[in-house]
Image: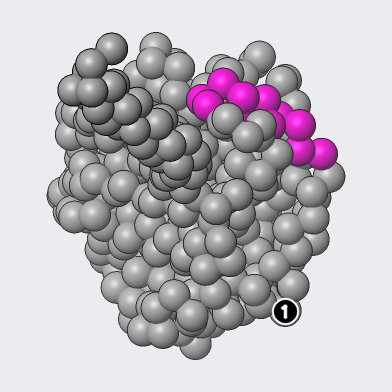
């Protein structure tokens, strides 16, 4: 080998050694970078329109807990990121958002969606694409099948359970079944609440529910007058009206109804949005009842006190309410599932991790349990009433 060839050989060998050394250095760096990659969680919700307070409340609660987790180092060093898209409480927009979140943003799961009309389209997409839909803000039985859909896991009690609690409360006050009327949104949400109340009445021996006054209104409108007239024209003047609607429409209905039905009790399901409803009613809110699916946000329960602390840490200007508390608790349980999942977390083993949760104490006085056959954590109803502008627990 000539001197020139020897020099070329040595130079090539040095380059190969250098390249190999770089490979040894950079491969672990790439692995670490991948490990620290953010965990993207999606959400399609009402950030505008008549249900915006609900969407914004759920979003704030979820983000507050994610912020707390990220401040503590994330999930095994990986930060959580919530990607929330606005659907305006419109099914077509919700469907488009689901596809974007799954196909473009490659989210691990969907959390905290708001509404039954939107769930009509998001649940089939979640099942078809095999992506978890967790902790949706709706009590519809659409998300509560028996056996449950693998890709739908709930936190809150159902509308059936809420309206059953209402019926018990009404009957305990000495009001007869035929003195009950309904005012509901004319869609799947209103149908779910109405069907739950009718079922509760039948279970309690009343089989003439079809004869009870039932006023309706169109979603995303304030056209409540026709529905109010339907109830006013009922053969028997109602002493209790169960409302299943958005807070803007329900507030207008209650204000007008109080002038022509002065001794009537008005009961709303949790989806109405308690704080916005109370603000919209003002002095007309006195005595109005709202069933809740989480404890009172001013409760001294450990988990609720933690919620208040973390909300203040996340956004000192953010108000406290039942909705953001529900979002916070949903995020807390979801994160427990992430912690239980394997190192290489994916959409399937996350579901199995959540299903493994048994008697988890999140500080609300009700243990959290799931299984393959039980995809709803809470079944308890907390009844509240507006007194002097504040919500007071009744039970």
Q: Quadrant of residue 190?
A: top left
Residue 351 drawn in magenta: yes
Residue 44 at what x, y percent from top left?
30, 41
- Identify the residue under disc 1: 300
Q: Where 366 falls versus 8 (above or below)? A: below
**16 or 349, which is in the foreground?**
16
Would residue 185 be counted in the magenta stretch? no
Bounds of the magenta segment: 346-358
- Front residue of 243 and 174: 243
Q: In this view of the protein, can residue 392 be seen by the observer? A: no
x then y, percent, for residue 305: 66, 77
Which of 204/307 is in front?
307
Residue 223 at what x, y percent from top left? 16, 49
Residue at the image position 43 percent from the left and 60 percent from the top: 63
Q: Is residue 40 visible?
A: yes
Q: Residue sitting at 82 percent across and 39 percent down?
A: 358
Q: Looking at the rendering, in which quadrant would you find the N terminus?
A: top left
- Judged by its main secondary structure, the magenta piece is helix
Residue 6, x across and y down, in percent: 28, 22
Q: Is residue 376 above or below residue 245?
A: above
- Number of numbered markers: 1
Q: Residue at x 40, y 64 (%)?
A: 60
């Amino acid at each position: 080998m000539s001197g020139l060839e020897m020099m070329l050989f040595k130079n090539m060998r040095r380059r190969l050694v250098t390249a190999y050394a770089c490979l040894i250095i950079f491969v672990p760096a790439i692995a670490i970078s991948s490990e620290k990659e953010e965990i993207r969680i999606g959400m399609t919700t009402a950030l505008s329109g008549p249900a915006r307070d609900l969407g914004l409340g759920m979003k704030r609660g979820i983000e507050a807990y994610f912020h707390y987790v990220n401040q503590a180092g994330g999930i095994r060093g990986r930060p959580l990121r919530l990607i929330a898209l606005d659907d305006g409480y419109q099914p077509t927009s919700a469907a488009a958002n689901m596809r974007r979140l799954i196909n473009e943003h490659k989210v691990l799961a969907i959390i905290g969606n708001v509404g039954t009309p939107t769930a009509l389209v998001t649940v089939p997409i979640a099942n078809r694409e095999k992506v978890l839909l967790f902790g949706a803000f709706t009590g519809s039985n659409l998300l509560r099948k028996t056996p449950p859909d693998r890709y739908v896991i709930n936190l809150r009690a159902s509308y059936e359970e809420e309206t059953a609690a209402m019926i018990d409360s009404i009957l305990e006050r000495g009001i007869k079944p035929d003195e009950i009327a309904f005012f509901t949104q004319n869609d799947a949400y209103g149908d779910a609440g109405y069907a739950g109340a009718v079922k509760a009445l039948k279970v309690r021996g009343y089989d003439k529910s079809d004869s009870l006054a039932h006023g309706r209104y169109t979603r995303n409108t304030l056209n409540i007058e026709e529905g109010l007239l339907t109830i006013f024209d009922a053969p028997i003047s109602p002493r209790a009206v169960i409302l299943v609607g958005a807070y803007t429409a329900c507030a207008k209905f209650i204000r007008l109804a109080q002038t022509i039905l002065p001794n009537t009790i008005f009961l709303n399901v949790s989806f109405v949005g308690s704080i916005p409803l109370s603000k919209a009613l003002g002095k007309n809110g006195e005595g109005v009842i709202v069933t809740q699916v989480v404890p009172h946000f001013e409760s001294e329960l450990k988990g609720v006190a933690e919620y208040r602390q973390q909300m203040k840490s996340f956004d000192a200007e953010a108000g406290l309410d039942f909705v953001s508390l529900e979002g916070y608790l949903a995020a807390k349980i979801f994160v427990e599932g992430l912690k239980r999942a394997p190192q290489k977390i994916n959409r399937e083993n996350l579901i199995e991790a959540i299903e493994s949760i048994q008697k988890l104490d999140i500080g609300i006085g009700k243990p959290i349990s799931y299984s393959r056959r039980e995809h709803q954590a809470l079944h308890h109803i907390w009844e509240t009433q507006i007194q002097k502008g504040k919500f007071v627990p009744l039970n």
